[in-house]
Structure formats: structure tokens, C-alpha cells
Amino acid sequence: GAVVSQHPSRVICKSGTSVKIECRSLDFQATTMFWYRQFPKKSLMLMATSNEGSKATYEQGVEKDKFLINHASLTLSTLTVTSAHPEDSSFYICSARVFDGGEQYFGPGTRLTVT
Amino acid sequence: AQKITQTQPGMFVQEKEAVTLDCTYDTSDPSYGLFWYKQPSSGEMIFLIYQGSYDQQNATEGRYSLNFQKARKSANLVISASQLGDSAMYFCAMREANTGNQFYFGTGTSLTVIP
């Protein structure tokens, strides 16, 4: 099956710094990528949807200026958590889709800890 | 209203026994898909099984089967011959055609297989 990778898998950063998470589709071109956030023992919450070459669409309550999403190519999307705070600590999962209605593949997730 | 409802926060099953994880959904879209994912402690979302709204037969994938009752809007996952490695969180999800194929996830069920 198709593979989606995320890098890094774990990151620890200090409060006030920014951290970038990469999501790559390894063997297919993803027209749409999704970013989810998951708190411990909770469900996945969609943060934003990004289409290659256009601005991301954020879900209600998600701060655009805090969670910067860039989908510069058909195989790469990045999520940058700016000025991170301890409450941003979470598990972030990306997902990639080939076309509207097509299969959607999930990355392995990135565990962010802000100290 | 919740799009996906999983009413069992935790379930236990004896090894080699079968277990049913409940999932009900809410949609007015005639075209939708239902998914089950397994999330072990590593965090990766593992696709298990898919059922389309127009599929006449219940989906099966190895030890996984989906009990699709369209009139009742339920899509329960049945795991037969449980193995210790089945211990994980299980998420039911739905994708509707009329909402841009966005995924809606349930709150998950934590399954523990007892030796």
C-alpha cells in the first residue's frame, strides 16, 4: 500500500520556539493532505486541509498563525508550530489523499513535547 | 450531532474469542464510506476495513468483518479469533461525499486481549 512518512517521529522543544513537522507521500502524488491532532486517549481532530499550491483550510478554533501549513509540492506538506507552548504538546498525524474521493493514507505521527 | 459514535470506551476479550466493537453513524448523504482503523501504542493509524454505502455485502478482511446495518446506521467491527497483538485503540470513521470527503472519527474503543 501507499506510504506516508512523517519527520520527526518525536520532538522535544522549549517553550517559545518553533518546530516544523514534515509529511511526505513516498510513492504517490497527494493533491490533498490533512493534519490531525490527537490528545492522549482521544480521537483524531482535524486541524486543517491543504491542497497543493493553495492556502490551507483550517477548522474552526485552529489558529492559522500558530499552526502554519505549507503544501508546496505534491509529495510534501509541512506543519510549523510557532511559538510553541506546553499546551501544544500532542500527537500530530498527517494524512494524504491522491484525489477527491480516493484512498487516504495516514502517516505514523509525530509526538511533540513542549517543555 | 456526532457523526460517529463509539459507545464502548474499553473492551476486554479472551484470547481466541471473537469481539464486536460498536459504531453508529449519522449522515444524510446517500454516498459515504465507513472505515475502521487500529492504533497501537506506537500511534500509527492502521487501516483495517472499508464499507461503502452502496455495498450490498458486508466487508471482510481476514479476521476482520464489518457488520453493516444500513437502516440502523451501524457499522460494527467483528474481530474473530482475537490475538494478543490485537490489543490497541480502534477507531471507526466515516467519509461523506458531500463534505469534500472529510474523515469523521469516533472517540475510539480501547481493546485489551487477555491471555
Image (tube, coloured by chain):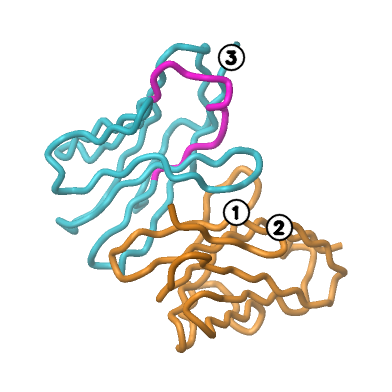
Chain colours: A orange, B cyan
Mark 3 neighbour density, 10 Å: few (under 14) some (14–19) many (20 or more)? some
Pointer 2 residue: A9
Which residue appears farthest toward the front when viewing the image? A27
SS assignment at label 3? strand
Mark 2 neighbour density, 10 Å: few (under 14) some (14–19) many (20 or more)? some
Q: Residue at x 49, y 34 (%)?
A: B109
Pointer 1 residue: A108
Q: Relative to A30, is A41 on the left or the right?
A: right
**In the image, residue B89 lies in the stretch drawn in magenta:** yes
Chain-order first, disc 1 or disc 2: 2
Q: Relative to A97, is A14 on the left or the right?
A: right
Pointer 3 residue: B114
> Start and end of the magenta stretch?
B79-92
Whole-percent x, y for residue A45 in the image = 52, 59
Amino acid carrying mark 3 in the image:
Ile
Amino acid carrying mark 2 in the image:
Ser
Whole-percent x, y for residue A56 in the image = 49, 81
Q: Are marks 1 and 2 in contact (CB under 8 Å)?
A: yes
CA distance for labels 3 and 2? 30 Å
Q: Residue at x 56, y 33 (%)?
A: B88
